[in-house]
Structures are given as C-alpha cells and as structure tokens.
Amino acid sequence: MHDLNVVIIGAGIGGLTAGIALQQAGFTVEIYDRVRELRPAGAGISLWSNGVKVMNSLGLGEQMAAIGGQMDQMQYRTKTGELLNDIDLLPLIETVGQRPYPVARRDLQAMLLKAFQGEVHLDHRCIAVEQDETQAIALFDNGHRATGDLVIAADGVRSILREYVLGKTVEPKYGGYVNWNGLVPASEDLAPKTSWVIYVGDHQRASLMPVAGDRFYFFFDVPLPKGTPAEPERYKSELATHFAGWAEPVQRLIEAFDPATVARPEIHDVGPIDAMVRGRVALLGDAAHATCPDLGQGGCQAMEDGWVLAQYLKTTNISVDYALQRYERDRKERTTAVVQKARQRAEMIHGKDPALTQKWYQQLAEESPQDVTDAIAKVILAGPMH
Ligand SMILES: Cc1cc2nc3c(=O)[nH]c(=O)nc-3n(C[C@H](O)[C@H](O)[C@H](O)COP(=O)(O)OP(=O)(O)OC[C@H]3O[C@@H](n4cnc5c(N)ncnc54)[C@H](O)[C@@H]3O)c2cc1C
C-alpha cells in the first residue's frame, strides 16, 4: 500500500522503531507521547542480535556499533565469586550472524530520535481511540484529534489502548522481584571490560555488562513483595544487606553507584493476550507483550513488531485491516512464546520453587558453554530476523 498516514501513540523503543520503519516504507508518520520531556526509563538494555538486526535493516548498524559495548564473553559466578561457567559469545555471533550490543538507554533513545524524521509531539496524553471503515482517530486530553489510516498503540506496559483492542482489562502481572539498574564507570576491579558477568545466589543476581563510553550497565535483582517502598537514599544500605557476604566486586559496585541515577522497577509482564489488533488499531511492544527481562528480549520484540508491521503494510494492497491481521497472526505467536519463556526463567532465577533454582545453579556449573549459546540462538532465530 502507499500514501498511508500512521498515528503512533508512545515514543519508546517500540513506537520509535515502528515510526522509522514506516517512514522508510514511504508512509507519513505522526508520533505522540504524554511526557513533556523524553527520558528513558532505566539505564541500560542488552539488545540481542535479532533487535540489532532490525536496527541494521533501518540503516542504523554503524550507529548501533558505536553505542554498543564489546561483549565477547559471558561469565556466571557464584555469589562468592567462584566461576561457574565462562561462555565465549563468538560462536553464538557466528551462528546468528550478528553481535549483541548492550547499550545505555539514553544513547539508544538519542539514536532512534535522530533517525525519526520530524518532531515527536510531546505533552499529548492519548485518552481514547475511534475508528470507522476509512480511518482511525486518536483523541488526546488537550482536545487534539489525530486522524490516520491506522493507529499504533505503543503506549507501554500500562497501555490504555489495550482495553480498547481486547474489549477487556488485562492488568500487568508482578514478576516477583525488584530490579535496581544504573551505569558506573567501567573498571577492571569490577569486571573484565569485554564480559557480561552475572553473580547468582540466594535467588538474587548482580550483573555488569559493558556499554560504550567506558561504562558498565549494572543491575541487581531481589525477590521482594510488591509495593516494598523505594527510597533512593536507602538503595545502598538495602543492597548492602541483600548482598552481604557476596564477592568483593559486588561490594565495590554497591559503593560505586550514584543512587540518584538508579532506576528501581518492580518487574511485570503482560499476557499472553488474545488479540493485538482491532480493525485499524494495533498494539505494539510492551502494550501487547511486556516481558520479564530475564531473556533480554522485551525491547527486541518491540523492534521486531515495528519491522514486521512495516513489511506487511508495505507488501499488501488488499487493505489496512488485512495487513494488521497478518501482523497479529505473526507476532502473537512469536511474542507469546517469548513472554512465557521469560516468565518461566524469571521464576526459575528468583526462587519461586527453591528446588528448581538450586537445580539451575547446579546446571550452570555443569552445562557446556555451547548449550548456553544454543539456547540463546534458538530464541533469536525463532523470530523474523533469522
Ligand atoms: C529492568 C528491565 C530490564 C530490561 N532489559 C531488557 C533487555 O536487556 N533487552 C530487551 O530487549 N528488553 C529489556 N527490557 C524490556 C524493554 O525495556 C521494553 O520491552 C521496552 O522498553 C518496551 O518499549 P515500548 O516502546 O513498547 O514501551 P515503553 O518504552 O514503555 O514506551 C511507552 C511510551 O508510551 C508513552 N505513553 C504511555 N501512555 C501514553 C498515553 N496515554 N498517551 C501518550 N503516550 C503514552 C510513555 O510515555 C512511553 O514513552 C527490560 C525491561 C526492564 C524493566
């Protein structure tokens, strides 16, 4: 199809990727976001090769490489620092055809905003959507109405348009743990600068991975009841308690970070849901399939969504509804599998069944590095960027 006008709600990773892909397909795109200033939620993100390949296909390969960290190995360590498994990532890169890139979210957002031609309309909170046989209209709290051939709801895990598409409310489900994440200057006394290092124990994780600018993106995971108070001035003492007795680099990391710059989300997922599309309105990214970050795939799936949607709109001349149905059929299956796998992994890592978590620690020590990279490759290659 040609000459389509597309309205996108949400300028996160999903909305921006879709916006760029649709512009490159020759469509007119307007993006709206409720915030007054775009700031990424969270410090870093690890983009596996499927997400990076979407960026490559949008002509952003060199820029991705410039903001990405050099991650050649992955090391699992016990909480006291003994090496469980040292995994060379180069065979994985050979298998899937692209290096993964951990990046600072601010760098990724800046890259995507620069690649999107035109302004994102900020301070526009979408409150509803309407449609008839020829158009879809997004309504905003400031009275503005944006009309297009279709509306893409990329409005995140707490999407208000999800209810419109599904005809019912689906609340995000708590993943059972809290994640603290931030950036620190890279230093060899924290971790090797070309490795992703993950300390595991007590159903918790502490992790460091390199991003551009000689920095580490780090996170801590702790299973806690939902609603445990978040007070930045207590982050260091809380983490010092949760990680008491852990290896020296973990202690140094707790000393090194600046709590004012640390994000502390409670992890949630969404779905699997019954539908991603209603007529001319399509859910995309976390709005449809927020994913526990335990596979590092939520953002990559949002990127795949944007790319796939653009392909279907570009390659059919039957109708917008038809293209969106094809998108839904394709993406529902893929993202359902990823959400479920990530949920399973989140529960295994964070001690939902302590015996299973213990078995996982054992398995980490015994399994061959190739088994680990094969499992990662399977997830990557099950998608459209194989
Ligand atoms: C701790 C953590 C670690 C993660 N790590 C990884 C990882 O390593 N790899 C990976 O691939 N993924 C990871 N993810 C997942 C990834 O962050 C998300 O899947 C991704 O950011 C989703 O992008 P999105 O565009 O769908 O939603 P969002 O980024 O949430 O964007 C939604 C946008 O919509 C706007 N919006 C919301 N409501 C409205 C409204 N009513 N009107 C207008 N605008 C609105 C919001 O302001 C926001 O800008 C992680 C997630 C977490 C929480």
Image (cartoon, rainbow, N blue to C red):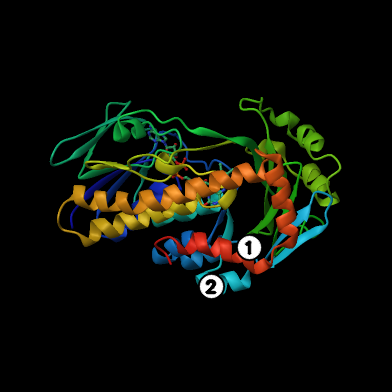
User: Is 206 situated left or right of 344 in this image?
Assistant: right
Q: Secondary structure at mark 1?
A: helix
Q: Nearer the viewer, residue 131 or 11?
A: 131
Q: Nearer the viewer, residue 345 or 207?
A: 345
Residue, disc 1: 372
Residue 331 - label: none
From the image, which quarter does the C terminus lie in? bottom left
User: Is 96 situated left or right of 225 in this image?
Assistant: left
Mark in front: 2 vs 1: 1
User: Which corner quadrant of the image does residue 54 belong to?
Assistant: bottom left
Residue, disc 2: 95
From the image, which quarter does the N terminus lie in? bottom left
The amino acid type found where label 2 is placed reads Thr
Q: Is residue 264 visible?
A: no
- Examine the rendered structure and indicate whether residue 118 appears above or below residue 243: below
Crowd around label 1: few <14 · some 14–19 · many ≥20 (10 Å): some
The amino acid type found where label 1 is placed reads Val
User: Which corner quadrant of the image does residue 347 belong to?
Assistant: top right
Identify which residue is drawn at 85% across, 50% down.
Answer: 248
List x then y, in percent, for residue 197. Answer: 72, 57
List x then y, in percent, for residue 315. Answer: 22, 62
